[in-house]
Image (tube, coloured by chain):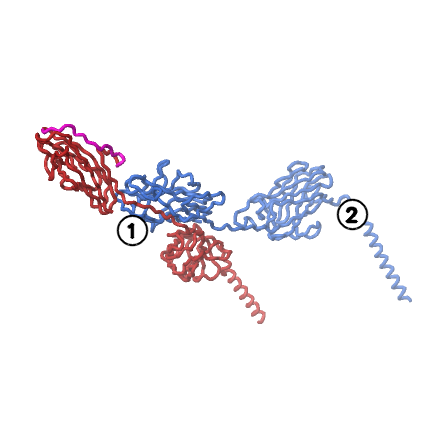
Chain colours: A blue, B red
C-alpha cells in the first residue's frame, strides 16, 4: 500500500510537471506567433533568370559562343528578383542566400556548382524608396548581401520592387552545374544596414534545365543537266534539261557554208549548295569527219570569220535564256564585245577539260546558254562532221 | 593480403577502362573534310572516267585508310545505295599527293578503300586520282562519301568524313555537214563573191588593121573538191557568117594587121590588158599563163587545181586583130567556161 501510494504520488508529480510545461508552451507560443517583430512574408516573389542552362554551358551545340546574359549561357547569367514589400518600414540591407532547400532558418546546402562570387554590383533596382542606393556589401559562392549606407523607409507596398544582379561578362552568376536542378534563394530584408534586424523574408525558386539541342543535316547538293531544247527553270523547281543533246549546226539541213557563219545553242542548268564554289568545264574534240576536221578556233577568243574553218563555243550572254546570277564566264568564253559573243575552243579539252564558267559560292539556279560557231573554207572537205561536247560540274564543298 | 589483391584488381580494371575510353575510335570526334571537290574527266553515262578527289584533312589524327563510297545519297547516317551500274571494281589509283603511300586495299562495285601503314597527318590538302571508274548508266546526280580511318583496313569508326557530288550528263552531240562545194561564176566584172558577178556582153566596136581590139571578162572559182577542178573555154572564134577571124591555135604574141583571136589569164603589156589571178590555189594552164602570149582553142583547159581551192579570181584578156583583107561583117562569138570539179 505504501509503495502504491508513493508511486501514485510520483506519477502525480510527473504529470503535474508535464502539465505545467505544456501550459507554459501553450502560453508562450501564441505570443511568439503574433510577435510584431517576426519577419513578414514577401509577396508576389519571383526570380527571373537569363538562362536556365547549367553552369558549364557557354556555347550552343554548334560551338557558337553564347554571350553573357543570354539564354544559352549558364555560366554567366543574370538574375532579377521581384517582390512586393508586405509592410512599410526601414530597409537597410538584404540577404540572398542560395540553397538546395527553401525554408528559412533551416540549414543551407549550396547548389552544386552555383557561384555568386562574381557578382560585383546591383545592376538594377526599381521602385525602391531611396533610389539606387543599394550596393553589394559582400558575396560568397552562394550568397549575395547588399546594403545601403542609411536605411530608408519603404512605403511602397503595392507594386513590386526589383533587384537585378549579373548578366555581364565581368559580373555574373553561375548556375548550378547540373541540369534540371531546382535551387532556392532565401531572401531576407533587414531594417538596419548590418543584416541584424530581419523584418521581411521570402524564398524564390528556380531551376536549371536541359537545353534542347536541335540538329539537322543539309546534305551536299548538286543538280546539273545539259540539253539542247530550252525548258523553263520553273522557279524554284530548277527543272533540269532532259533531252538527248542533239544539236544540228548549219542551215535547215544542217549544212555549213563557206560564205556564211552558222550558230547553234545548247544549255546547261546547275544548282548547288557548294559553299566554296563551282566550276563548269567542257571537254570534247572539234568537229571531225573521218580524218578531216574543222579547225578549232583557238584558245584565245576570236570572232566569226566566214570562209575560214572555225569551230568554237562561248557563253551567249545575249541569249535571254541565259540566266547567270551566280556564274561568270571565264576569260575567252563570253567576255567579248556587247552583243557579239566571242568564241574559243581547245581541242585538248578532250583530255584536259577547260573551265567555261565559275561561281564563288552557292548557285540557286543558273542556266547557261552555250553558243557554237561553225565556219568552213572552200578547202574544207565535204563530209558529215560530228563531235560530242561534254560538260562537267565541279562543286567544292 | 586478399584486400591488397582486390584493390590491385580494381586499380587495373579502372586503368584499363580509362585507357579504352581514351583510345577507342568511337570516342574520336569526327570532323568534316574541308574544301572537298571531285572532278571527273568524262561525265557521260557508262563512260570510263578518271575521278580526281581533292580535300583538306581537318586535323592531324593518324590515317591508315580512306574509303570512297559511291552512293545515291551523301549522308553517312542513311544506307548507301549504289548508283545504277557504277563500277569501281577495276579502278586504279593513278595519283596521290599530300598524304601518300596508299595502295588500293579493297574495292567493290561502289567502294574503293586505299590503305597504308597508319601514320600521323598534317592538316593539309590531299589529292587522290582514280582511273577507269565506270560511270553510272543513267544521267543522275550521285555522291561519294569519303571517310578516313586510323586503321589500315577501314575498320572502326571513321575519323573524318565528307561527301562530294557529281553528275552524269548527256553530252551535246554537235553534227553538221560540209557539202560538196563548187562556186563558179563568170561576168565582165566581179567585185566580191559570185553574187557580185555582173555583165556578159562585150562590144568591141569597129575593128581596124592598125589597132588591137581588146577586152576582159572575169571568172571566180572555189571548191572543196578533194581531187580538184578544171576550167575549160568552149566556143568558136569570131565569125561573121562564113567569115572568120583566125583563132590562135598556139601561143602567139599580139601582131597588129594579122587576123588573130586569142586570150590569156595574165596581166599583159602588149596590149595593156588583164590582171594576174587573185586568191585561191588555181594553176593556170601553160598556154594561157604567159603574159603577151595568146591562144584560143575550143575546149582548151585554161586553169585547174589539183585539190580544194579557196575563191580565186581570174581575168580573161581577149585580143582581136584583123588584116586589111578581113571581110566586112559583124563578127561575134559566145564563149562558155566550164568548171568541172572532182570530189
Residue found at the far front of this picture:
B242
The residue to which callout 2 is attached is A33
The residue to which callout 1 is attached is A290
The disc, 1 or 2, on the residue closer to the chain's N-terminal end is 2
Q: Nearer the viewer, mark 1 or mark 2?
A: 1
> Horizontal and vertical percent for residue A137?
63, 43
Residue found at the far bottom of this picture:
B1
Whether labels 1 and 2 belong to a single chain: the reply is yes
Q: Tell me whether circle 1 and circle 2 mark residues in contact (CB < 8 Å).
A: no
Crowd around label 1: few <14 · some 14–19 · many ≥20 (10 Å): few
The residue at the point 43 percent across, 50 percent down is: B35
> Horizontal and vertical percent for residue B174?
35, 47
Secondary structure found at label 2 = helix
Q: Nearer the viewer, residue A201 or A70?
A: A70
> Horizontal and vertical percent for residue A1?
91, 67
Residue A214 in view, yes or no: yes
Residue B192 location, quadrant: top left
Does the magenta-highlighted stretch encompass residue B290? no
The image shows a total of numbered marks equal to 2
Amino acid at each position: 500500500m505504501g509503495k502504491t501510494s508513493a508511486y501514485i504520488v510520483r506519477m502525480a508529480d510527473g504529470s503535474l510537471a508535464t502539465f505545467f510545461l505544456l501550459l507554459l508552451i501553450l502560453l508562450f507560443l501564441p505570443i511568439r506567433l503574433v510577435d510584431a517583430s517576426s519577419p513578414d512574408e514577401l509577396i508576389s516573389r519571383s526570380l527571373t533568370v537569363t538562362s536556365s542552362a547549367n553552369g558549364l554551358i557557354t556555347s550552343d551545340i554548334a560551338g557558337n559562343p553564347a554571350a553573357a546574359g543570354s539564354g544559352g549561357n549558364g555560366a554567366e547569367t543574370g538574375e532579377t528578383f521581384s517582390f512586393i514589400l508586405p509592410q512599410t518600414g526601414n530597409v537597410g540591407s538584404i540577404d540572398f542566400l542560395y540553397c538546395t532547400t527553401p525554408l528559412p532558418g533551416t540549414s543551407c546546402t549550396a547548389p552544386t556548382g552555383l557561384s555568386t562570387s562574381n557578382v560585383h554590383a546591383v545592376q538594377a533596382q526599381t521602385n525602391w524608396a531611396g533610389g539606387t542606393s543599394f550596393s553589394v556589401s559582400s558575396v560568397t559562392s552562394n550568397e549575395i548581401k547588399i546594403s545601403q549606407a542609411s536605411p530608408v523607409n519603404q512605403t511602397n507596398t503595392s507594386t513590386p520592387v526589383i533587384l537585378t544582379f549579373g548578366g555581364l561578362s565581368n559580373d555574373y552568376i553561375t548556375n548550378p552545374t547540373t541540369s534540371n536542378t531546382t535551387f532556392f534563394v532565401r531572401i531576407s530584408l533587414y531594417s538596419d544596414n548590418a543584416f541584424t534586424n530581419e523584418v521581411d523574408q521570402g524564398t524564390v525558386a528556380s531551376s536549371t534545365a536541359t537545353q534542347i539541342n536541335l540538329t539537322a543535316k543539309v546534305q551536299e547538293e548538286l543538280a546539273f543537266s545539259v540539253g539542247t531544247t530550252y525548258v523553263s527553270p520553273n522557279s524554284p523547281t530548277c527543272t533540269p534539261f532532259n533531252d538527248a543533246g542533239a544539236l544540228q549546226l548549219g542551215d535547215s539541213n544542217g549544212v555549213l557554208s563557206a560564205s556564211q557563219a552558222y550558230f547553234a545553242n545548247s544549255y546547261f542548268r546547275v544548282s548547288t549548295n557548294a559553299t566554296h564554289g563551282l566550276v563548269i568545264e567542257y571537254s570534247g574534240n572539234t568537229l571531225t569527219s573521218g580524218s578531216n576536221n574543222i579547225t578549232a578556233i583557238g584558245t584565245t577568243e576570236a570572232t566569226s570569220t566566214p570562209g575560214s574553218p572555225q569551230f568554237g563555243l562561248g557563253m551567249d550572254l545575249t541569249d535571254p535564256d541565259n540566266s547567270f546570277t551566280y556564274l561568270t564566264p571565264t576569260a575567252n568564253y563570253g567576255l567579248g564585245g556587247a552583243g557579239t559573243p566571242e568564241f574559243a575552243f581547245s581541242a585538248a579539252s578532250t583530255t584536259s577539260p577547260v573551265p567555261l564558267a565559275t561561281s564563288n559560292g552557292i548557285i540557286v539556279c543558273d542556266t547557261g546558254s552555250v553558243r557554237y560557231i561553225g565556219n568552213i573554207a572552200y578547202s574544207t572537205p565535204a563530209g558529215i562532221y560530228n563531235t560530242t561536247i561534254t560538260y562537267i560540274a565541279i562543286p567544292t564543298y | 593480403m586478399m584486400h591488397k589483391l582486390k584493390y590491385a584488381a580494381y586499380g587495373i580494371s579502372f586503368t584499363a577502362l580509362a585507357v579504352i575510353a581514351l583510345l577507342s575510335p568511337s570516342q574520336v570526334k569526327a570532323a568534316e573534310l574541308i574544301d572537298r571537290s571531285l572532278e571527273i574527266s568524262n561525265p557521260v553515262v557508262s563512260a570510263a572516267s578518271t575521278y580526281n578527289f581533292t580535300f583538306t584533312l581537318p586535323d592531324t589524327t593518324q590515317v591508315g585508310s580512306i574509303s570512297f563510297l559511291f552512293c545515291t545519297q551523301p549522308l553517312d547516317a542513311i544506307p548507301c545505295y549504289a548508283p545504277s551500274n557504277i563500277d569501281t571494281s577495276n579502278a586504279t589509283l593513278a595519283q596521290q599527293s599530300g598524304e601518300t603511300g596508299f595502295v588500293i586495299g579493297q574495292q567493290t562495285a561502289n567502294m574503293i578503300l586505299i590503305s597504308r601503314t597508319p601514320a600521323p597527318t598534317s592538316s593539309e590538302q590531299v589529292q587522290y586520282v582514280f582511273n577507269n571508274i565506270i560511270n553510272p548508266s543513267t544521267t543522275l546526280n550521285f555522291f561519294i562519301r569519303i571517310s578516313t580511318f586510323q586503321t589500315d583496313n577501314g575498320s572502326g569508326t571513321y575519323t573524318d568524313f565528307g561527301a562530294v557530288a557529281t553528275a552524269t550528263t548527256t553530252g551535246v552531240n554537235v553534227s553538221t555537214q560540209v557539202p560538196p562545194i563548187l562556186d563558179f561564176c563568170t561576168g565582165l566584172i566581179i567585185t566580191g563573191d559570185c553574187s557580185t558577178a555582173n555583165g556578159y556582153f562585150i562590144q568591141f566596136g569597129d575593128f581596124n588593121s592598125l589597132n588591137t581590139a581588146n577586152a576582159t571578162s572575169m571568172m571566180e572559182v572555189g571548191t572543196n573538191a578533194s581531187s580538184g577542178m578544171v576550167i575549160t573555154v568552149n566556143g568558136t572564134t569570131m565569125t561573121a557568117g562564113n567569115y572568120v577571124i583566125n583563132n590562135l591555135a598556139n601561143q602567139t604574141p599580139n601582131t597588129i594587121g594579122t587576123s588573130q583571136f586569142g586570150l590569156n589569164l595574165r596581166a599583159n603589156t602588149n596590149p595593156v590588158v588583164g590582171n594576174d589571178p587573185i586568191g585561191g590555189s588555181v594553176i593556170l594552164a601553160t598556154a594561157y599563163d604567159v603574159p603577151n602570149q595568146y591562144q584560143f582553142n575550143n575546149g582548151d583547159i585554161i586553169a585547174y587545181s589539183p585539190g580544194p581551192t579557196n575563191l580565186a579570181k581570174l581575168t580573161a584578156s581577149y585580143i582581136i586583130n584583123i588584116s586589111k583583107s578581113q571581110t566586112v561583117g559583124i563578127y561575134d562569138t559566145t564563149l562558155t567556161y566550164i568548171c568541172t570539179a572532182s570530189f
